[in-house]
Image: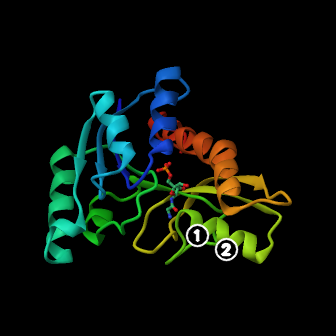
Amino acid sequence: MLRLLVCVSGGGTNLQAILDAIDGGTVANARVETVISNNAGAYALERARRRGIEALCISPKDYAARADFETAFCAAVEERSPDLIVLAGFLVKVPDRLIADFPRRIINIHPSLIPSFCGVGYYGLKVHEAALARGVKITGATVHYVDGGMDTGPILLQKAVEVKPGDTPEILQRRVMEEAEWKLLPQAIDMIANGRA
Ligand code: GAR
Protein backbone atom coordinates (compact mmCIF):
# COMPACT_ATOMS: atom_id res chain seq x y z
CA MET A 1 0.00 0.00 0.00
CA LEU A 2 1.54 3.29 -1.15
CA ARG A 3 1.08 5.89 1.60
CA LEU A 4 0.53 9.33 0.08
CA LEU A 5 1.09 12.79 1.48
CA VAL A 6 -0.65 15.36 -0.72
CA CYS A 7 0.37 19.05 -0.69
CA VAL A 8 -2.22 21.61 -1.78
CA SER A 9 -2.79 25.37 -1.83
CA GLY A 10 -6.31 25.94 -3.12
CA GLY A 11 -9.54 24.30 -4.13
CA GLY A 12 -8.21 20.78 -4.19
CA THR A 13 -9.98 19.45 -7.27
CA ASN A 14 -6.89 17.37 -8.06
CA LEU A 15 -6.92 16.00 -4.51
CA GLN A 16 -10.59 15.14 -5.07
CA ALA A 17 -9.74 13.36 -8.32
CA ILE A 18 -7.19 11.23 -6.45
CA LEU A 19 -9.67 10.37 -3.69
CA ASP A 20 -12.40 9.53 -6.23
CA ALA A 21 -10.02 7.34 -8.23
CA ILE A 22 -9.00 5.45 -5.08
CA ASP A 23 -12.69 4.99 -4.18
CA GLY A 24 -13.55 3.89 -7.69
CA GLY A 25 -10.63 1.48 -7.93
CA THR A 26 -8.83 3.13 -10.86
CA VAL A 27 -5.98 3.77 -8.40
CA ALA A 28 -5.05 0.55 -6.65
CA ASN A 29 -2.77 -0.02 -3.66
CA ALA A 30 -2.61 3.61 -2.53
CA ARG A 31 -4.18 5.69 0.22
CA VAL A 32 -4.03 9.37 1.15
CA GLU A 33 -2.79 9.60 4.74
CA THR A 34 -2.09 13.32 5.11
CA VAL A 35 -2.90 16.57 3.33
CA ILE A 36 -0.75 19.65 3.97
CA SER A 37 -1.63 23.15 2.81
CA ASN A 38 0.29 26.39 3.05
CA ASN A 39 -3.06 28.18 3.12
CA ALA A 40 -5.44 27.76 6.07
CA GLY A 41 -8.42 28.76 3.91
CA ALA A 42 -7.77 26.14 1.23
CA TYR A 43 -10.96 24.21 0.47
CA ALA A 44 -8.71 21.22 -0.14
CA LEU A 45 -8.22 20.96 3.65
CA GLU A 46 -11.97 20.77 4.10
CA ARG A 47 -12.19 18.00 1.51
CA ALA A 48 -9.60 16.03 3.49
CA ARG A 49 -11.16 16.63 6.91
CA ARG A 50 -14.59 15.53 5.69
CA ARG A 51 -13.08 12.18 4.85
CA GLY A 52 -11.24 11.86 8.13
CA ILE A 53 -7.86 12.41 6.50
CA GLU A 54 -5.28 14.28 8.58
CA ALA A 55 -5.25 17.88 7.29
CA LEU A 56 -2.53 20.33 8.34
CA CYS A 57 -1.79 23.95 7.54
CA ILE A 58 1.88 24.93 7.57
CA SER A 59 2.18 28.45 6.20
CA PRO A 60 5.26 30.61 5.55
CA LYS A 61 3.14 33.48 6.90
CA ASP A 62 3.26 31.94 10.36
CA TYR A 63 7.06 32.03 10.53
CA ALA A 64 9.37 35.04 10.85
CA ALA A 65 11.97 33.49 8.54
CA ARG A 66 11.63 31.27 5.49
CA ALA A 67 14.15 28.87 7.03
CA ASP A 68 11.86 28.35 10.03
CA PHE A 69 8.92 27.53 7.75
CA GLU A 70 11.08 25.06 5.82
CA THR A 71 12.23 23.38 9.04
CA ALA A 72 8.63 22.97 10.23
CA PHE A 73 7.43 21.74 6.83
CA CYS A 74 10.25 19.22 6.47
CA ALA A 75 9.77 17.97 10.03
CA ALA A 76 6.04 17.40 9.46
CA VAL A 77 6.71 15.44 6.28
CA GLU A 78 9.64 13.46 7.67
CA GLU A 79 7.66 12.50 10.79
CA ARG A 80 5.04 10.92 8.57
CA SER A 81 7.57 9.32 6.25
CA PRO A 82 5.23 8.96 3.24
CA ASP A 83 6.03 6.64 0.34
CA LEU A 84 5.09 9.36 -2.16
CA ILE A 85 4.60 13.12 -1.90
CA VAL A 86 2.08 14.47 -4.41
CA LEU A 87 2.07 18.19 -5.21
CA ALA A 88 -1.53 18.73 -6.30
CA GLY A 89 -1.71 22.46 -6.92
CA PHE A 90 0.93 23.29 -4.30
CA LEU A 91 2.21 26.79 -5.00
CA VAL A 92 5.18 26.80 -2.63
CA LYS A 93 8.69 25.72 -3.62
CA VAL A 94 9.53 22.45 -1.89
CA PRO A 95 12.60 22.82 0.37
CA ASP A 96 15.79 21.38 -1.18
CA ARG A 97 16.31 19.20 1.88
CA LEU A 98 13.05 17.37 1.20
CA ILE A 99 13.93 16.87 -2.46
CA ALA A 100 17.23 15.32 -1.37
CA ASP A 101 15.48 13.09 1.19
CA PHE A 102 12.76 11.88 -1.21
CA PRO A 103 14.49 11.21 -4.53
CA ARG A 104 11.95 10.19 -7.23
CA ARG A 105 9.32 10.17 -4.52
CA ILE A 106 7.82 13.61 -5.16
CA ILE A 107 5.55 14.24 -8.16
CA ASN A 108 3.89 17.44 -9.36
CA ILE A 109 1.01 18.24 -11.71
CA HIS A 110 1.52 21.27 -13.93
CA PRO A 111 -1.25 22.69 -16.16
CA SER A 112 0.69 22.92 -19.44
CA LEU A 113 2.75 20.76 -21.76
CA ILE A 114 6.20 21.24 -20.19
CA PRO A 115 8.54 22.81 -21.35
CA SER A 116 5.93 25.35 -22.49
CA PHE A 117 4.54 27.83 -19.95
CA CYS A 118 6.38 26.51 -16.91
CA GLY A 119 9.01 27.66 -14.44
CA VAL A 120 9.08 30.66 -12.14
CA GLY A 121 5.88 32.72 -12.29
CA TYR A 122 3.84 30.12 -14.18
CA TYR A 123 1.18 28.72 -11.88
CA GLY A 124 -2.59 28.38 -11.82
CA LEU A 125 -4.49 30.75 -14.08
CA LYS A 126 -1.28 32.53 -15.17
CA VAL A 127 -0.31 29.45 -17.17
CA HIS A 128 -3.53 29.59 -19.19
CA GLU A 129 -3.32 33.38 -19.63
CA ALA A 130 0.16 32.90 -21.11
CA ALA A 131 -0.97 30.08 -23.40
CA LEU A 132 -3.84 32.20 -24.76
CA ALA A 133 -1.59 35.27 -25.14
CA ARG A 134 0.87 33.19 -27.20
CA GLY A 135 -1.96 31.84 -29.31
CA VAL A 136 -1.14 28.14 -28.99
CA LYS A 137 -3.78 25.79 -30.37
CA ILE A 138 -2.84 22.86 -28.15
CA THR A 139 -2.03 22.92 -24.45
CA GLY A 140 -2.40 20.26 -21.77
CA ALA A 141 -0.99 19.01 -18.50
CA THR A 142 2.16 17.27 -17.27
CA VAL A 143 2.97 15.05 -14.32
CA HIS A 144 6.67 15.08 -13.51
CA TYR A 145 9.06 14.06 -10.78
CA VAL A 146 10.25 17.00 -8.72
CA ASP A 147 13.94 17.87 -8.71
CA GLY A 148 15.73 20.99 -7.48
CA GLY A 149 14.47 23.21 -10.33
CA MET A 150 11.07 24.71 -11.05
CA ASP A 151 9.10 22.25 -13.24
CA THR A 152 12.35 20.69 -14.52
CA GLY A 153 12.20 17.09 -13.27
CA PRO A 154 11.76 13.99 -15.46
CA ILE A 155 8.36 13.81 -17.15
CA LEU A 156 6.12 10.89 -16.23
CA LEU A 157 2.91 11.63 -18.16
CA GLN A 158 1.50 14.30 -20.47
CA LYS A 159 -1.87 14.83 -22.12
CA ALA A 160 -2.78 17.34 -24.82
CA VAL A 161 -5.91 19.51 -24.69
CA GLU A 162 -7.33 21.63 -27.50
CA VAL A 163 -7.54 25.42 -27.18
CA LYS A 164 -10.85 26.62 -28.68
CA PRO A 165 -11.86 29.96 -30.19
CA GLY A 166 -13.31 32.25 -27.55
CA ASP A 167 -11.56 30.52 -24.65
CA THR A 168 -10.96 32.63 -21.55
CA PRO A 169 -8.24 31.61 -19.08
CA GLU A 170 -10.95 30.26 -16.78
CA ILE A 171 -12.64 28.20 -19.50
CA LEU A 172 -9.31 26.80 -20.66
CA GLN A 173 -8.24 26.02 -17.08
CA ARG A 174 -11.42 24.05 -16.52
CA ARG A 175 -10.99 22.08 -19.78
CA VAL A 176 -7.36 21.25 -18.95
CA MET A 177 -8.44 20.04 -15.52
CA GLU A 178 -11.36 17.94 -16.81
CA GLU A 179 -9.65 16.45 -19.84
CA ALA A 180 -6.12 16.09 -18.52
CA GLU A 181 -5.24 16.85 -14.89
CA TRP A 182 -7.94 14.87 -13.13
CA LYS A 183 -7.03 11.82 -15.21
CA LEU A 184 -3.26 12.14 -15.32
CA LEU A 185 -2.52 12.57 -11.63
CA PRO A 186 -4.46 9.47 -10.52
CA GLN A 187 -2.94 7.55 -13.44
CA ALA A 188 0.58 8.52 -12.35
CA ILE A 189 -0.12 7.46 -8.77
CA ASP A 190 -1.52 4.13 -9.96
CA MET A 191 1.58 3.57 -12.09
CA ILE A 192 3.90 4.27 -9.16
CA ALA A 193 1.83 2.26 -6.67
CA ASN A 194 1.85 -0.75 -8.94
CA GLY A 195 5.43 -0.76 -10.18
CA ARG A 196 4.76 0.59 -13.69
CA ALA A 197 6.53 3.97 -13.47
C1 GAR B 1 -4.15 23.00 -10.92
O1 GAR B 1 -4.53 23.47 -12.19
C2 GAR B 1 -2.67 22.62 -10.93
O2 GAR B 1 -2.25 22.05 -12.13
C3 GAR B 1 -2.03 23.96 -10.71
O3 GAR B 1 -2.84 24.57 -9.72
C4 GAR B 1 -4.19 24.12 -9.89
C5 GAR B 1 -4.72 23.65 -8.57
O4 GAR B 1 -6.09 23.34 -8.63
N1 GAR B 1 -0.66 23.83 -10.32
C6 GAR B 1 0.30 24.67 -10.72
O5 GAR B 1 0.09 25.65 -11.40
C7 GAR B 1 1.70 24.30 -10.23
N2 GAR B 1 2.68 25.05 -10.93
P1 GAR B 1 -6.80 22.44 -7.53
O6 GAR B 1 -6.45 23.04 -6.15
O7 GAR B 1 -8.26 22.54 -7.82
O8 GAR B 1 -6.29 21.03 -7.66
Q: Which residue is mark 2?
A: 130
Which amino acid, by three-letter code, is at mark 1?
A: Lys
- Residue at horizontal 66 percent and vertical 47 percent from the top: 180
Across and down, in percent, residue 158 comes to: 66, 54
Across and down, in percent, residue 176 comes to: 67, 51
Instruction: Determine the CA span between mark 1 and mark 2.
Output: 6 Å
Across and down, in percent, residue 177 comes to: 62, 48
Residue 61 visible in the current orientation: yes
Which amino acid, by three-letter code, is at mark 2?
A: Ala
Across and down, in percent, residue 62 comes to: 16, 66
- Residue at horizontal 32 percent and vertical 29 percent from the top: 50
Q: How many marks?
A: 2
Of all residues, the one furthest to the right in this rendering is 165
Q: Quadrant of the N terminus?
A: top left
Q: Which residue is mark 1?
A: 126
For label 2, the SS is helix
